Each structure stands twice: as C-alpha cells, then as structure tokens.
Image: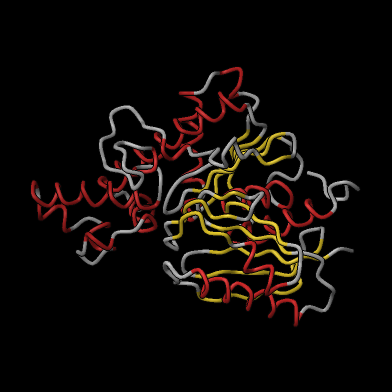
Amino acid sequence: MRHVIGLDVGGTTMKGAVMDENGRILLRAAKETKVHNNLPVLIERMAALIKELRDQSPVPIESVGIGFPGPFDAENGISVHSPNFQLHQADLRTPLAKLVKLPLFFENDLRTAALGEAMFGTGREVSHLIFVPLGTGVGAGIVNEGKLVRGSHGFAGEIGHVRYPGLTAPCNCGKLGCVETVASATGIARLARERLDKELDANPRQAKASPLFTLCDGQLERITAEQVATAVEQGDAVATCAWNEACEVTGWALSVLVNVCNPQLVVIGGGVCRAGELLLAPVQASVQQYAMDVVHQQTKIVLAELGADAGMLGAGALALQATNREQGTVKL
C-alpha cells in the first residue's frame, strides 16, 4: 500500500493528512497560516506541517501533493496570483523542496478538491465530473476522462467570473455583475442584507420582526449565508427572495457548464452546500430551465460528500497519480 501526504493550504489554516491510495486518512494535522506577502514564512510553515506529519506517520511517505489558492502554474510550482497571500509569480517549489526532500506536486486548491471528489467522493464511478464549490467565491474544477482540465494557462473553470445578464454588483475581479456576486456565500449574504435594509426603510416594524433580523441581532453587516438559509426555513420573505435569486443564478451558471462540458455529474460543494435540499432542489430546477434538455437529462446534479476533506484528499490523489502514472495504479 502506498502512502502520501495531502496538503490543503488556505488563507487562514492549512490542513494536512497522511493517506493511502484508497483515500483512507491515517493521520491529520493543521497549522495557522494568516501570512500576507511573506513567502519565506509561508514556506517554513508548510514545511513544518509536512515534517510533523512525516515524523508522526506510522508508514513511509513517498511524496506530497499540495493544493494552493489562486491561479497556479502546476508544472513549475509557481503561484501565478494568490490574493489570500498577496503573492504574484511566486516560486513555491524551489524553496519548499530544499526543506522537505520529497517529490512535490502542486495544483490550484479548487482543482485538488475536484480531484478528491472524483476519486474518493461522489464521483467515484464517473470519468466526467465538474465540481463547483459555493463559498467565499465560485469556481469549477473540471475532470474530463479522468484528468483535470487546466486550460492553456491554468485558468480553466472560472465560471464565477462569467457575467450574468442584469447583474450590476462589483466583483473582486474588477468587473461588474459576475456570477460570484450572487451565487456564493458572500453574495447570498449581500443580497439579503441589501433587501433587509430596504425593508427596514419601507416597513421597519415588520422588518424588525423578521427571523433574519433576529438571527443577525439587528446587525445587518454580520448577516451570513447560513443565517439566510435558516431564515428561509422559518418563512422569512426577504431571505427567501435573496435565496431564490442566488439559486437561480447558480443554476444558470451550472447550465453553462453542463451545455459546454457535457459531464456525467455536477457536484456542488463549499460551505453553502450544507443547506442540503434547500439549495439542491431549486438549483436543479434552474438548471433544468436553462440547460439544453438532451444534455441536462444525462447529467446528475448532487451535493459533495467529502466536505472539508476534499482538498486534502485531492492533493494526496494528485501525488498518487503523478508518482505512479506509468504503472496505472491510480485510476479515476
């Protein structure tokens, strides 16, 4: 049995695991990141976490897979641009390899999560899958015939930055009206906050009696997508309006992916997917409305299985695939 380390590097925390080729986690560890524009410190912390896992592992480690946020040049181990760490064209491979002394394999963190779901999660039985996490932002990890789709420069899957007709909110990418401004945890919270603010101006007594107002303790700037989902379940009209818009835009974005990529499976992940059927049912209905029937009928849309472990497992899968591709040990 082969064993690797999978590392999922986030802006606040990096999580790592020792795992086998069946996706079984033998050991876990985590370290705080919160490093901005300081590559040496980030490299030191990544190396320390890998060393901790390697030292405590009951089995030998053959390689390390790493999922890193932002557009990434996987072949050369270079972070093209990572807003989380304020890095641009940063070489991670060279300094980390000097400290770790193991084969290193890198990929954008969204794609490693897609690979995790494809190999060890909901997509175990399919070879054409799209993983769409709905969290702070929105993206798409595409697996086609068992292989990750990166695009010519590693930017494939940026569905969150496709403009939806009629939207005008500014996006972090610098454009207006992107899918991400609505179909994300931050987008859902923004929609609900703006609608509740208008309701407070028009009918303050009724607005203050609403479940959403109560859930956020009257502090609209603290509204979260989770609170919006809870308020929807309690019959809040403002929350329901915001939620329905987000689900429709999400379904529209997925219909674009379905039409263009013709996957067997679309897997919705990220923090918003914890809403379960409250999210899945209206998104499925929206996809059915917008996607081409003959394509939609052949595509299942489901919720992710692996949760927060998808990135770690996918990073480990990346290492497994890369180190034994010739023998064909790892297959999707």
Residue 316 percent location from the top left of the image = 72, 59
Question: Which residue is pictured at 50% across the width and 54% down the height?
Answer: 89
Specify the quadrant of the image occupied by residue 20. Answer: bottom right
Q: Residue at x 51, y 23 (%)?
A: 291
Looking at the rendered structure, the number of numbered marks drawn on it comes to: 0
Residue shown at 83% from the left, 49% from the top: 330
In which quarter of the view is residue 167 placed?
Answer: top left
Q: Of residues 83 and 304, which is closer to you in this image?
A: 83
* Relative image position of residue 218 (x, y in whole percent): 19, 64
The N terminus appears in which quarter of the rendering?
Answer: bottom right
**Left or right position of 104 against 70:** right
> Is residue 266 rendered to the left or right of residue 12?
right
User: Left or right: 132 with respect to 170?
Assistant: right
Front residue of 147/234: it is: 147
Choose between 59 and 84: the one closer to the eye.
84
Q: Position of residue 67 (x, y in %)?
A: 61, 58
Taking 257 as reference, is 280 above or below it? below
Q: Nearer the viewer, residue 72 or 98?
A: 98
Query: Is 199 situated left or right of 18 in this image?
Result: left
Q: Residue at x 29, y 59 (%)?
A: 223
- In the image, residue 154 sits, relative to residue 319, either above or below, namely above
